[in-house]
Image: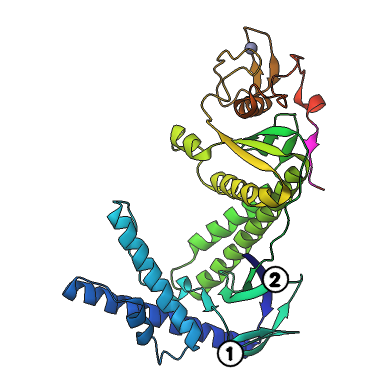
Amino acid sequence: MRAYCFRLYPSKAQEKELAHHLWLEKNLWNSLLEKTKNKYDEEGKFYSKTELQLMVKDSGLYSQSAQAIAHRLHRAIQAKIRAKRKGQKWGFPRFRSFERMRSILYPQSGFSLGEKLKVSPFGEIAIVRHRIIKGKIKMLCLKRESSGKWHAIFTVENELQTPKTNNGPAVGLDLGLNRLATLSDGKIIQNPHHFRKLEEKLAAAQRNLSKKRKGSHNRCKARRKAALVHEKIANARKDHLHKSANRLLSIYSKIVMEDLRIREMAQEGHGKGIYDASWGMFTHLLCYKAENAGSEIVFVNPKDTTKECSRCHSIVSKSLRERVHQCSSCGLTLDRDVNAAINILTRATAGMAESNACGDGKIIPSLKQEAAPFRVR
Ligand SMILES: [Zn+2]
């Protein structure tokens, strides 16, 4: 399955109608949820899927979209029940405001795609098809972004592709804060410079938003504006991660990374937030693209990868600020992250013929000479 996302340009009348349908969805969701809660309070059990489906008739929505709401609620409740049985924490579905209702689903039919997107009951909506859909369309989601833009997201069943074979080398990869990643062969994947500018813009937009009175028209406008910048950052980041992942997988047959779950546990409270999201998404992209690229992703234990000397394996403690690994036992001087990346690679390939992780003991004077920035395109 694969998703294609296209920008929609509804007319003023269509936009009003779309918003009205989100409002109907919100009402439907909230009323189903309330009935569900009442039933549970009185009888100690939940509605079945069929019962929920019967309750969504006459909602004023396209029947399939209304059914999809019933499905969503049913799934959310089932997830809650499963989690409870396992003793895990899981929130019960919540009542939603209009702002939280974002999408209208068409699980099977109700739409056709030509020059424009024909979708009931809105008629033909202008769409920008910036790429060709390969495969069979299974589902359509009309989505309103926080910025007020509309998108059509098609879920498509892919034909199976034969995976490529990749004879490239293995590499260790250390995820970072300032750079996206450092590789064991000294290459670097930078975070594009314009990210910082966008982030500053976002901070300014959010400050501006916080000054506006709640419920005011100006606040609504400021929220849209902040959401637009946020969307821009998210898109730029996603684009960068996709391109970087593709580039890596076209070069290396095996990419060794730290197991982030273990790393997260070890440094709780550290580097949370936006970077974690990037790391998680990057790892996810590498994993799901790897198969078709004929490459393999390997995860290793992150314990002491930054402290260990990649040549003699003695432990060299360093603070977060120290950017250079300097070993007093064997004299190795190396960029801190390259040293870590080599350790990561060693953990997955130690003792194998292909392993080039041990290094030849050459002292690398500075990162600038050895590590040419790894630029995508
Ligand atoms: Zn050493």
Question: Residue 375: within the magenta?
Answer: yes
Q: Which residue lies furthest to the left in this view?
A: 42
Q: Estimate the x, y position of residue 70 in percent, counting from the top left.
A: 40, 78
User: Magenta segment range?
Assistant: 372-376
| Three-letter amino acid code of the residue under disc 2 | Gly
In the rendered structure, find residue 184 and report the number of the disc placed on it.
Answer: none
CA separation in Å, label 1 and label 2? 23 Å
Q: How is the image coloured?
A: rainbow
The residue identified by callout 2 is 135
Label 1: element kind = loop
Q: In the image, is residue 316 above or below residue 6? A: above
Q: Is residue 152 visible?
A: no
CB-based contact (under 8 Å), mark 1 and mark 2 = no
The residue under the point 45% across, 91% down is 60
Quick one: label 1, few (<14), some, or many (20+) residues within 10 Å? Answer: some
The residue under the point 33% across, 59% down is 82
Q: Which of marks 1 and 2 is nearer the N terminus?
A: 1
Residue 249 figure quarter: top right
Is residue 74 or residue 350 the one in the foreground?
A: 350
Q: Is residue 260 visible?
A: yes
Judge depth for marks 1 and 2 and give the one in front.
Answer: 2
Q: In the image, is residue 183 above or below residue 309? A: below
Is residue 88 or residue 164 the one in the foreground?
A: 164
Is residue 31 or residue 219 the one in the foreground?
A: 31
The residue under the point 69% across, 37% down is 254
Q: Estimate the x, y position of residue 238 in percent, counting from the top left.
A: 66, 55
Q: In the image, is residue 50 above or below residue 274? A: below
For ligand 1, the image quadrant comes to top right
In the rendered structure, find residue 120 and report the number of the disc placed on it.
Answer: 1
